[in-house]
Image (cartoon, rainbow, N blue to C red):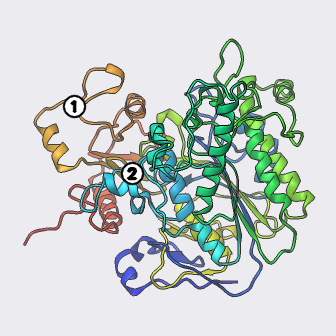
Amino acid sequence: MRKRFIVSMKAKSTITWIAAGSVRLGAVVLGLLGCALPGEASPRPNVILILTDDQSPRNPPTPNFPHLICPPGFGYGGDRVLTPHVNRLASEGMVFTNANVSCPVCSPSRYTTLTGRYATRSAGEVFNRLFPSGSMARPENNIELGRTEPNLPRLLKSAGYTTAWVGKCHILEQHILESPKLWGTPAAPGLKRYPFDSDPKSDAKTNQSMRENQQWWRRRIRQEGFDWVGAVYPGNLLELFNKPSNVHNVEWTTRSVLDFLETQSPGSDKPFFLYYGTTIPHGPDPWGKTHGRFTSGIDADPGYTGEGYRTDLDYSFMPSRASIKREVVAAGYDVKHAWLTWFDHSIGAILRKLDERDLARDTLIMVTSDHGTWRYGKTTMYEGGLKVPLVMRWPAGIRPGSSYPHLVTNTDYAATLLDLANVDVPHDCMLDGLSLEPVLRGHTSSPLRQETYHEIGFARAVKTAKWKYIAVRYPEEIQRRIDAGEKFPAFDGAPPIPRPYLVANAHLGHHSSRHNPNYFAPDQLYDLEEDPEEIHNVADQYPEVVADLKARLKRHLLTFPDRPFGEFTRQKTQ
């Protein structure tokens, strides 16, 4: 079974170099998305895409907590946590041991996952107002889906899929999330305001307002191509703008996933796509204790949800939170890691529902994360931010117990799902990724791609199996101030610094720069085989490697029209 992907001749002349030498059987899909037409009739999988929040793929020595959703034996060091259901997915499916994201922070990574495009290509209003055409783009948590922008759910929907959403958003209405004072104004008609400290458990007015706001967000997400929308967190938990509700509730979102699956029937001629974004383990840290209890995580009151305080919901599809803690301790694990077993039971409930509904065989489950956090790699080009766990199970299409050690990036997800869904992409419609279908079908010995491209704030990078080159460049106006010796604001009253952080979030910039010794260096080269923690910048020792990777980076950057990035995009004068 092969599908037909059409790439315009104009596009080929500018960007098909990305796939040169990297594809044998898979479809090449590069560039911008557009309208899709159903392909020839053939079995197409249901898809459940589960996206955790801030999770690295292995147990690092520091910080002292595991960000992990893979079992032992697959290169992820899963001997520190109890995750039997993810272990099952891995043993019955495929583990990707070199999966990456293109932009390692929440919003742009979710954008790429749902569009197949690099974050800098966003048509979002806020991003393009901050960085109009002709200026350096600085993607971070300023990315959102454009209101008319094609995306994965719209494309799948046009091909006959039922599309559903559950969980964290953070890629719509960024101006609202950043400015709650706008609620109830023309900028957000219909949203209700309430005091930050008011408790929906005891304040009926606040509880009702949160209930109505939940419906507002569900209606808004439906506009982006989703037929069915369940439990929604508009952004991070804090962006409910309600202090008592700033706690994780895995059961609340899991219940919505199960509610949707109850509407699906085996053998239906309308397969489904379900996007499930969890809040685990983003802050508030679910492993953090207050007065001896995990008050933001597994010990929190389960009545607090994204729609106010509720006591009428049945959560019997999962073990009680107290029993999960006992289970972890009885198995010999540290109870501070019970939050991960808690999330694992969410996956277990989903797997049981698929079995009950006779949907398991024809359903592709993907479990991954929006980015990593190891050694404060979030918002950097380092492995701690780029590398993520990725497990896929599809009984009808993936050989059990398989693995793939070669480079993968989250731009590939949309290309893969559209390929499996038999979606033809017209000549003027392209993606930034490669279809992983040949990998899923068992062609795992050779790499599909030779490199990946990455971006965040003032930094860009290319990565191969062995090398990574990072370029840090500032807009000309900022570079002039740096050259003149001007100092720039640091985090939390610290002394000014000689160069700005890579991102606007000074908290993240501060911690990332403290834990990564070459954070501000303009040109960085790392031998990932010899120095996986990227401690030693060897750019001066391997000029020929730097020259090669700079040339590759330039080719990527030239696919972004009117987006300057230092000397890489300057036109040579005659």
Residue 407 seen from this side? no
Question: Where residue 139 is drawn, which disc sits there?
Answer: 2
Read off the residue under disc 1. Answer: 498
Mark 2: secondary structure: loop
Mark 1: few/some/many CA within 10 Å (<14, 14-19, 20+) = some
Q: In which quarter of the image is residue 400?
A: bottom right
Q: Which mark's residue is nearer the viewer, 1 or 2?
A: 2
Q: Nearer the viewer, residue 325 or 115?
A: 115
Quadrant housing the C terminus: bottom left
Classify the position of the N terminus by image quarter. bottom right
- Give the left or right position of residue 426, taking residue 393 as reference: left
Say whether marks 1 and 2 touch (CB < 8 Å). Answer: no
Q: Is residue 527 above or below residue 329?
A: below
Q: Is 219 on the left-hand or right-hand side of 171?
A: right
Q: Is residue 159 above or below residue 251?
A: below
Q: Type of residue at label 2? A: Pro
Which one is nearer the viewer's eye here, 305 or 170? Answer: 305
> Between marks 1 and 2, how big is the CA–CA gap?
22 Å
Mark 1: which secondary structure?
loop
Q: Where is residue 445 in the image (x, y as percent from the top left)?
A: 63, 66
Residue at 40%, 57% (x, y): give it.
125
132, 10: nearer the viewer: 132
Position of 47 relative to 526 (above/below): below
- Locate residue 486 relative to residue 250 in the image: left or right: left
Crowdedness near tag 2: few (<14), some (14–19) or many (≥20) residues, C-alpha within 10 Å = many
Mark toward the start of the polypeptide (1 vs 2): 2
Q: Which residue is drawn at 76% across and 66% down?
A: 398
Where residue 503 appears, as percent x and y from the top left, is: 36, 41
